[in-house]
Amino acid sequence: MSKEKALDIVLSEFLKLASVPRPSHHEERVSEYLYQWAKNHGLAVEKDSMNEIIIDKPASPGCENVPRVIFQAHMDMVCVCEKGITYDPMNDPIKVINDGVTLTAEGTSLGADDGIGVAMCLYLLQDNTLRHGPIRAVFTTNEEDGMDSMAIDPKYLEGNYLVNLDWETLGSLCNSCAGGDFFNYSHSAEWETPVPGSKTLSITFNNLLGGHSGVGINKGHANALVSIATLLSMLQQGGVSYRIASFSGGQAKNAIPAFGSAAIAIAADEETKAREIISVFRREFEEAFGNIEENMAFTAEITNVAPARVLTGEIGYGMVGLMTTVPNNVHTMSPFIDGLVESSANLGVVSVDDEMVRFTVFARSSVAYQATQIGVICAALASSFGFSFDSEGHVPGWSVNPNSKLTHITCDAYQHLTGTEMVVEPVHAGVECGAFAEKNPNLDMIAIGPTLLDVHTPKESCKIEDVKITTELLIEILERIAQ
């Protein structure tokens, strides 16, 4: 094995990983896969109670006193697919397409977030030609939907340096991140029979851009769920009374919803008025998003068959009122760093079943006050509309370390490899370094990685050349520390 084969090894490991289903909350199989991988390579390995995997590789000869470097990536992925694609994330592999330039997947998310980070770690663990001090790889679970690493045992974070590989822009180095809170709204579902002679209005949004609710929150992408709720609110304000029969959409709490649907019952004599309001909504939506959501598909169809049951007006109107008034989109911009979102919120998923009406807002902030303010607003609105409210959990933030040696080493190495300067920047998203900073405040940490596009969507892609450069950068970081 040699460094010249590093890219081939990384891509090979990624393909193998793609064959192992690994949706968030269901990492048992991929955890066991990584555990056995370590055993097969003769490396010390532990599996904790959360199925997180910790693999240790001893220092190369003569480097035993070099500080330990921890490489970290998460093993779960956001599993989404294109409309019309049959895909079972619990059992189906990801079908990776490699055209020699870019990695994509056939009809689903690729899982390069963060499978490519895992694959790079596996390369570093197996290449015995590298010169380095002690290496530890930490593979965490449920990063995408709750961040299990907040409960990791601090003993696994004993080291001097930590390189997080859950970053999506080559040439950029993350040095701090925002924290976040999941706010859940719920109400028991109370059903009734629609008024005789009612018609059904079916509303759908498809093919919106969606995307990451942190780094993509300021890109102007439409939220399918908020858009549908806005139309329903316009109907109510325009004098069209309705009752909700169904409302669903979104695939992940931390993704901007790219699709959604609702069905409502309306009175037959209000059809004309409803169509007029829908026409106004369509025009205003296209004026706002037409140049952004170019592939958007919006439908609003009225049929003469009434739904079998509908939510009571109090619950339905309360649900729509909440969905249109909870914080969604950018809340504040940083007054200190141009272009940095300071705080935001995203309404990510909604569901209505036999028993419950539910939806979730994920709020992010790099400033404690703004996080508190969004939480106060969200709780007060729930009370106003008669919904139950709870906070599922707090994701910690990570502050800038002005004395980071690892940042300096990495920037110098990147300049040496590419001839260009690395950009050092914070991010408006949750990075597991926030959890690690709480466990070991002395860790010198960075987050880097190859360029990934359209993460958390079926269009997710990864540039192969960027994987090559990132892997070479990791090698040089290790060797510079060893010197």
Image (cartoon, rainbow, N blue to C red):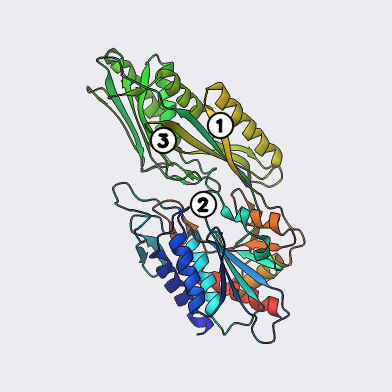
Q: What is the C-alpha distance between the residues marked 1 and 3?
A: 15 Å
In the drawing, does residue 81 fall left or right of residue 181? left
Residue lying at 47% horizontally and 58% vertically, measured from the top left: 27
In what quadrant of the picture does the C terminus appear? bottom right
| Residue designated by label 1 | 389
| Residue designated by label 2 | 144
Q: Evaluate if marks 3 and 2 touch, with contact meaning CB atoms under 8 Å apart.
A: no
Q: Crowding at label 3, few (<14), some or many (≥20) Cα neighbours within 10 Å?
A: some
Q: Crowding at label 2, few (<14), some or many (≥20) Cα neighbours within 10 Å?
A: many
Q: Secondary structure at mark 2?
A: loop
Q: Mark number for residue 351?
A: 3
- Between residues 329 and 125, which one lies in front from this camera angle? 125
First in sequence, mark 1 or 3: give its number: 3
Q: Residue lying farthest front?
A: 49
- Between residues 174 and 432, which one lies in front from this camera angle? 432
Name the spot of residue 6 as percent of width and height, x first.
50, 78
Tag in front: 1 or 2: 1
Residue lying at 31% horizontally and 24% vertically, measured from the top left: 309
Residue lying at 55% horizontally and 27% vertically, measured from the top left: 382
The answer to whether residue 81 shows anywhere in this view is yes
Residue 415 lies in quadrant: bottom right
Amino acid type of the residue tagged 1 in the rendering: Phe
Amino acid type of the residue tagged 3 in the rendering: Ser
Name the spot of residue 129 as percent of width and height, x first.
57, 85
